[in-house]
Amino acid sequence: MKKHVDARGLSCPEPVLLTRQALQDQVVKEITVLVDNKVAVENVTRMAENSNCQVKIEKQDSDFILTLIKTK
């Protein structure tokens, strides 16, 4: 199951908290996170990697798309 988190316009720690909440859903295996600043990219990436997720980052216009895939 996939889940989407739109954290554009939010400052940290809100994107991290929303992503962490999505990761807690045991059924979800992949999460797409939309953010609009590099600090959020760095913080969400660090949290996801510490939560056993692979992270793929794409830049799209002024936004970033992070794809998190649970490995465990």
Image: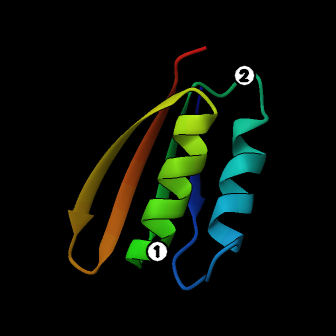
In the image, taking residue 58 as reference, residue 69 lies left or right, namely right
Q: Nearer the viewer, residue 61 or 49?
A: 49
The residues bearing labels 1 and 2 have C-alpha atoms spaced at a distance of: 28 Å
Q: Amino acid at mark 2?
A: Val
**Residue 64 horizontal/vertical position (percent):** 34, 65
Count all numbered tags in the image, as a single digit: 2
Above or below for 38 versus 65: below
Name the N-terminal-most of marks 1 and 2: 2
**Residue 24 horizontal/vertical position (percent):** 79, 35
The disc placed on residue 63 is: none
Task: Identify the element where label 1 is drawn.
Answer: helix
Task: Identify the element where label 2 is drawn.
Answer: loop
The disc placed on residue 39 is: 1
Within-10-Å neighbours for mark 2: few <14, some 14–19, many 20+: few
**Which quadrant of the structure image shows residue 6?**
bottom right
Q: Nearer the viewer, residue 41 or 1?
A: 41
Q: Amino acid at mark 1?
A: Val
In the image, taking residue 62 as reference, residue 41 lies left or right, namely right
**Residue 2 horizontal/vertical position (percent):** 56, 34
Colouring scheme, one of rainbow, by chain, secondary structure, one colour: rainbow
Above or below for 20 versus 37: above
Residue at 46 percent of width and 74 percent of height: 39
Residue at 70 percent of width and 38 percent of height: 23
Q: Which residue position holds label 2?
A: 27
Above or below for 38 versus 17: below
Above or below for 65 versus 53: below
Residue 3 visible (yes or no): no
For the C terminus, the quadrant is top right
Within-10-Å neighbours for mark 1: few <14, some 14–19, many 20+: few
